[in-house]
Amino acid sequence: MADDIKKKGRDSELVSTQEHEIAYLVKATNKTREEVLKAISEIGPSRQMVMEYLSRGPLKTRSGG
């Protein structure tokens, strides 16, 4: 039986820690494997949020004073 087309696309909204997903994100964002895994663990599995997080430059902190 063919896949239910109503369920198609849900997977594309989420990222996993499977190697092919990590490899894709490393290549797409030009980040290291460790940075990608850290983003997924901090942000969660939302592909959009992970991509936004990884597309930002280094996080800058405000210095007091």
Image (tube, rainbow, N blue to C red):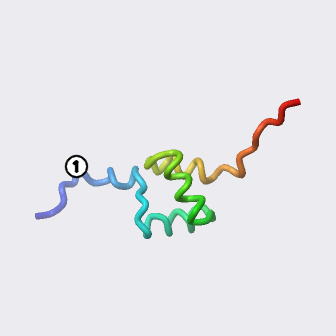
Residue at the extreme left of the image, as rendered? 1
Q: Residues within 10 Å of mark 1 (few under 14, many from 20)?
A: few
At which x and y percent is residue 32?
61, 65
Q: Mark 1: which secondary structure? A: loop
Instruction: State the residue in front, 22 or 4.
Output: 22
Residue 17 spot, x, y in % from top left: 43, 61
Instruction: Tell whether 11 sits left or right of 53.
Output: left
Residue beneath the point at 52% across and 62% down: 25
Numbered disc total: 1
Q: Position of residue 60 (x, y in %)?
A: 75, 44
Furthest residue to the top?
A: 65
Pointer 1: what residue?
6
Q: Quadrant of the N terminus?
A: bottom left
Q: Is residue 58 left or right of residue 27?
A: right
Task: Tell which of 53 and 63 is nearer to you.
Answer: 63
Please report the residue visible at 76 percent of the width from the left and 40 percent of the height from the top: 61
Residue 49 percent location from the top left of the image: 52, 45
The residue at 44%/69% (across/down) is 19
Amino acid type at image mark 1: Lys
Asked if residue 23 is positioned above or below residue 55 in the image, the reply reads: below
Q: Is residue 60 left or right of residue 52?
A: right
Question: What residue is at 18 percent from the left and 60 percent from the top?
Answer: 3
Looking at this view, name the residue that lies furthest to the front: 64
Q: Quadrant of the C terminus?
A: top right
